[in-house]
Image (tube, grey):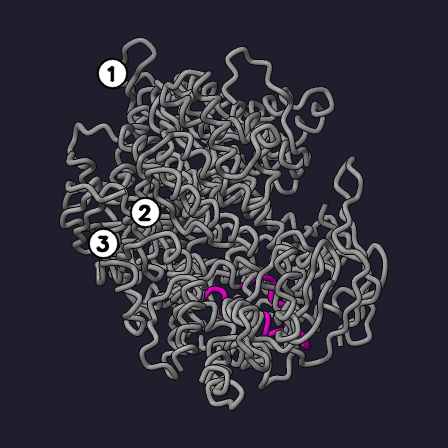
Amino acid sequence: MFELQRNVIFGQFVDTGSPVHRMDPRLKLAAAFVLIVASFLIDTFAGYALVLPLLVLIHVLSRVPFGYLLRGSRFFLGFLVFILVFQVLFYPGEVQPSNVLWSWGVLSVSTTGIRFAAIVGLRVLLLYYVTTMLMLTTSLVDLTNALELVFRPLQRLRVPVNEMVLVFVIAIKFVPIFIEEIERLAKAQTARGVPFDEGGAIKRARRIGRLLVPIFISGFNRADVLTTAMNVRSYRGGRGRTKLRRMHASAGDWTALVLIISWVLVAWQFPASGWL
Amino acid sequence: MEAGTSPVIELKNFRYTYLEGTPRAVEAIRDVSLEIHRGERVAIVGATQSGKSTLVDALVYLLRLGSGQVFYEGEDVTAPGYDRGKLRREIGVVFQSPDAQIVENIVGADVAFGPTAAGIPAEETRKRVEESLNAVGLSYPEYRLRYVHALSGGQRRRVAIAGVLAMRTPVLVLDEPTAGLDPRGRRELLDLLLNLRKERELTLVVCSAGLEEASLLCDRFVVLDAGKVVMDGPAREILRRSNRLAELDISLPETVNVASELKKIFPDFPTSLLTEEELEAEILKHLGAG
Amino acid sequence: MIEIEDLSFAYRTGEEDAIPALRGVNLRIGPGQFVAVIGHNGSGKSTLVKLLVAVLYPTEGRIRVDGIPVRPGNEWEVRERISVVFQDPDDQLVMNRVADDVAFGPENLGLPREKIAERVHSSLEALGLEEMGERLIEDLSPGQKQRVAIAGALAMRPRFLVLDEPTTLLPAPVAARLISTVRDLNRSGGMGVLHITHSMSEAALFDRVVVMDEGKLVLDGTPAEIFREVDRLRSIGLDVPPAVSLVHRLRARGVPLEGDILDGADLRRALAALAESPAYRRCSG
Amino acid sequence: MMTESGSGRRGSVFSFRVRQIVVAGVLGAIAVLLGVTRWGFIPVPNLAGNATIMHVPAILGGALEGPVVGFLAGAIFGIFSWIDATIPLFKDPIVAVVPRLFIGVVAWVVFALLRKRSLSVASALAGILGSATNTVGVLGLAVWRGYLPPAAIVPIIPQAIAEAILAAIITVVVVRGVMLVRSGRTTAPETKDEERRY
């Protein structure tokens, strides 16, 4: 319980140096966005049958071991099965009596319910696969840089892009610092005989509240110093800022993005066109 | 104050890997065996990342199970049924950051925290609070109701020490006791610790990156490098090997630095001097002889 | 040139009366000077820093930086001339990668990309971090983080670098290396340095030492001049370097040591000279 | 206490003060660390086994620092719970992020309205209603997006109540602690306890 950093998987970046890793983070972000939108648009089995192999292909190209991803996904998959069963049993929509396979009180199993749950399951699976692949192949730092660069033109329209990204950057920066601090706190207080893992929920909430007080106080103090430091380094908002970091999108990156967009369009429109 | 025969704390082939099994694993301690006897005053010295903080954690067992054993008074504290609560009532640790250690927001309440948790009656606790606050130079009537957050860094460190003293532990462990203090705070704290050392029969362990205060408080040095004990012996013997210490990035007491300079003109000038008084006497002796 | 005239400042904290943090400070620091400021906690050192970079404004008196008065409206001009490094690098580094953080200041100035790249490169090089641009800051040691902070300050190309206790949290050998790097920067670039510290041995390495106590400037001179005032310094909660203290003792015992002695090497030279001197031979013989 | 001169160049609705950016980042980091260290999950006897308190920093951001900070801290919490989700419905960015934006804003409204009357009541209600915003928003969107049948809400109610109560307790404790430090008071009132221990 003292090695809190053990559990830290915030940002699951695994660098294999693959082409997926090397893709321009801006285009990667755009590709992920397209795929997330796809999960909202596609609602046919054929559509998912077309789009999921694309993710598998990306996964293979990323060279992230399948076992690694699967091990990290056990809890997710278990939970997914659980809510799907729930979804089937309590399906709220209109069901033709002919589609009911089994029912008992409020519980029922119908083909309509199963179909609906299966589509929801595939949608969640796609969302999960997309975000996980994005996080596995892109460091958080590159991701924030990409976010800022992609949305930079909006800064001219007074949308505080730089400011919002900066909030994210500062949060990422402070996580390891606070984890170290909280680790120190937990150790020192255990050494003084504060019982950590005991007591009921209310008692624990109070104890955690009291432990959080020094974290918040130190957080506010750190925030004051950092505010001063940023002011002293001439930070006055995102407008008028320039940027050192440049990103390079290769022809290959653009091709990949175009490919992904077309693939998604096909998966979305092809089944609806009645050809399948 | 003579050292007893059986050690009060003993580490046997202790190894510890921080964040074991993760990509960020660090071998913090690689095979340390160490005996500390009752009444000894030991400094554990090493540069950053040498493993000294992990060693402090091992003493009160604030770790996962590592390999090797840690004994307190002959009992294996790593054994499953061992009462670690008792261990922590026997070994008092003053950590580097008092803010992490202080659990209450009123000075008196914090000092009373340990004894209260240990089930000591109110009357006795109050006596101990008074005694401990006075011992660290914070007058009891003036400070018992003060808010901790309104104190200076040096004062907070004293409150942390008082909280440990109130437990009357036979062993006291101090992690970087004077780090970050200004000259006045540092001097006052050193005086206080020297006084405690004189008045109470304490087994003292001081953890430090440099030998400056360690040389004033302790008479045995255990030097760590990359998780291993590389030197262990009487303070003055270790100080003679100043070149080796400098290689390990351990800062020497200024008195030793001055003595090393003087050795260039007085070839028989001893370098393992700990106090200004000793240095002064030695110079006068050399001048008289010259 | 930093000019401070009759500077007073009081914090206003809620209902309580204003507590004066600075009282009538007069100080001039010329371009390229290498100055240490010492004083115990609460002596007003850190308040002085905040006033210098227009984070706070004087209650009374004036500050001018290269002729620019520090007052609301001028803060950005002032901050382009003075950079500050604070005690804990964790609280002042903004970005997550070394090069990005060093670039943060120049980016705020709206410099063209090539200029920023050049400044980042030269600042990293000056601090011996040229290989570390792409490293994550969280993976660095405290000493390296503090170097990144200094590189970030340097990238602003300031006329003055203010160091607000940057060595307090560092082990002594690491701190010593940092100060020697700053000395090199001062010598090669002509940038003025104002170093606030608790360490008397560090202060002894500077050309000029300013002593503060209870919001007032009490002593100002060369280290040798300042550390002559052993009793005065001790009475205000400060100290002198150990070698100075030793010399003080020896002189009190009648050993006629000549000259200004600040460290072991000075003492060695003085003792060697003494051993050679005829006067000494006569009395010991 | 700190006079800040580094506010945005122009007073647009969209410009944040530097301090707001930094404080929101700090509070977002605390929310994230409650998640990654598992400190943010308190065991309660119910279906999921745990009640989360990860939304508390957003509540505190709203209560102590205003709606902008509450909003941004909630955004960080939301984005984190999206990219790090193990519970399927949070893999949908709409469910994970959108409701979280309002936690701090609601907490701010409640706290600002009631703080003159009683700090503890204001904190407790900010905790409860901030928590409720989170629960109602997440569940509502999850049902709307088809991840949960409406019937699934019933067994989650005890969990939601537990989270609201825990959030209220922690908000009260932390607000009191932070306010005490900010008050600048140096000495506590005399204790009257018969069994005075100090």
Residue highlighted by disc 3? B29
Q: Is residue A65 above or below residue D27?
A: below
Give the residue pinned by disc 2: B205
Chain under label 1?
Answer: A
Whether residue C239 can be seen here: yes
Is label 3 in a helix, a strand or a loop? strand
Chain letter for mark 2, please: B
The magenta span reads C144-166
Hey, what amino acid is under mark 3? Ile
Say which of marks 3 and 1 sits in front.
Answer: 3
The image shows residue A75, relative to residue C211, as above or below, that is above
Neighbor class of circle 1 (other Cα within 10 Å; few <14, some 14-19, many 20+) is few
Residue at 15 percent across and 46 percent down: it is B67
* Quadrant of the rendered image containing residue D51: top left
Amino acid type of the residue that numbered disc 1 sits on in the rendered structure: Trp
Q: Position of residue A20 (x, y in %)?
A: 33, 64
Q: Provide the residue designation for mark 1.
A: A102
